[in-house]
Image (cartoon, rainbow, N blue to C red):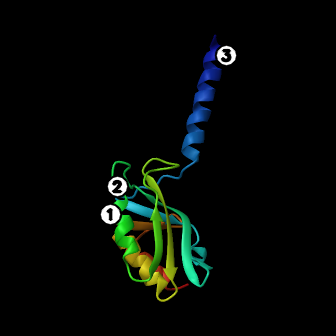
Amino acid sequence: MRKIIFLSLLMFLFSVSYVFAQEKQYNVDGRFIVVENPASLFVEKDNCMEISEHYIHNFNDDVSSKPEHVAVNELENVIKFGIASNSERYYNQRRFYIRLAKDDYKKTFYNALITMGVKAVVVNDKVMTVEEFYNYLLKF
């Protein structure tokens, strides 16, 4: 009987640790994105700069992404912007894609983040404001 309880507890702990190991947790209020390598954030493709497979965290599932979709697509130098209508992988995270004209693309991305309601950017586990992140991006 003790073995069954021990094995059950062990299986439970393994399951819980596996779930939490899948996604790093950040203590950030409001919407934020995570950038692991700012130097390779933008990829040049067809004479444009693009970012794909990035996520906006803390984007509530009960909130429509349509206003952000429309507003970002209307920004100058945004060629195409797409955002998932709901969380696909993790709760309250929306995948997004953005394609930008090369002219002042870092400033355009900054404006897009502000338009999407992003409050912070996590770079190498350091939380920055969007303004701080923009200034950091200018170094690359």
Q: Is mark 3 on a helix, strand or loop?
A: helix
Q: Which residue is drawn at 35% across and 58% down?
A: 29
In the rendered image, residue 114, in percent from the top left (x then y), is placed at 35, 72
Q: Which amino acid does label 2 sit on?
A: Ser
Q: Earlier in the sequence, mark 3 or mark 1?
A: 3
Q: Residue 67 carries which label?
A: 1
Of tags 3 and 2, which is closer to the observer? Answer: 2
Q: Distance between the residues labelled 3 and 1?
A: 55 Å
Q: Is residue 138 left or right of residue 58?
A: right
- The quarter of the image holding the N terminus is top right
Q: Which residue is drawn at 38% across and 72% down?
A: 72
Q: Determine whether label 1 and label 2 are within 8 Å by CB.
A: yes
- The quarter of the image holding the C terminus is bottom right
Which class describes the residues within 10 Å of circle 3: few (<14), some (14-19), or many (20+)?
A: few
Q: Which of 103 and 122 is in front in this view?
A: 103
Q: Which amino acid does label 1 sit on?
A: Pro
In the rendered view, would you say 123 is above or below 8? below
Which class describes the residues within 10 Å of circle 2: few (<14), some (14-19), or many (20+)?
A: few
In the rendered image, residue 7, in percent from the top left (x then y), is placed at 65, 22
In the rendered view, would you say 2 is above or below 84? above
Q: Label 2: which residue?
A: 64
Q: Label 3: which residue?
A: 3
In the rendered image, residue 117, in percent from the top left (x then y), is placed at 34, 66
